[in-house]
Image (cartoon, rainbow, N blue to C red):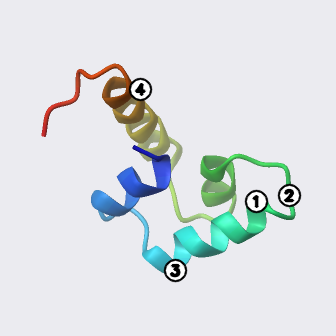
Amino acid sequence: MKLGQILLRKHIIAPQQLEEAIREQDVYPLKLGEILIQKGWLAPQALQEALKEQNWRKKGFWII
């Protein structure tokens, strides 16, 4: 599952925020989480939790 999908699913960011951050990735060579933090839409701790979930899902350990 992509990071943006996880953040949306947890209601941490709004769909409009995700769309804007993705558009900015076309302009700036930053990762999605970096952009969201720079804009003040995402706390570093929330990013770490979402990345942890993403990693666990990738390995097949996340069950929800």
Disc 2 crowd rating (10 Å Cα; few below 14, some 14-19, many 20+) is few
Q: Of helix, strand and loop, which one carries label 2?
A: loop
CA–CA distance between discs 1 and 4?
21 Å
User: Does 6 sit left or right of 10 as displayed?
Assistant: right
**In the rendering, at what x and y percent does residue 19 appear?**
58, 73
Hey, what amino acid is under mark 4? Asn
Hey, what amino acid is under mark 1? Gln
The answer to which of 61 and 45 lies nearer the viewer is 61
Badge number at residue 25:
1
Badge number at residue 16:
3
Mark 3 / mark 4, whichever is N-terminal: 3
Say whether marks 1 and 4 touch (CB < 8 Å): no
Where, quadrant-wise, is the N terminus in this rendering? top left
Disc 3 crowd rating (10 Å Cα; few below 14, some 14-19, many 20+) is few
Direction bottom: furthest residue: 16
Count the numbered circles shown: 4
CA–CA distance between discs 1 and 3?
14 Å
Say whether marks 4 and 2 touch (CB < 8 Å): no
Hey, what amino acid is under mark 2? Tyr
User: Does 19 sit left or right of 52 as displayed?
Assistant: right
Disc 1 crowd rating (10 Å Cα; few below 14, some 14-19, many 20+) is some
CA–CA distance between discs 3 and 2?
18 Å
Say whether marks 2 and 1 touch (CB < 8 Å): yes
Q: Is residue 38 placed above or below 62 in the rendered structure?
A: below
Q: Of helix, strand and loop, which one carries label 1?
A: helix
Q: Residue drawn 12% across and 40% down?
A: 64
Q: Residue drawn 61% across and 59% down?
A: 36
Which residue has dot 4 on it?
55
Hey, what amino acid is under mark 3? Gln
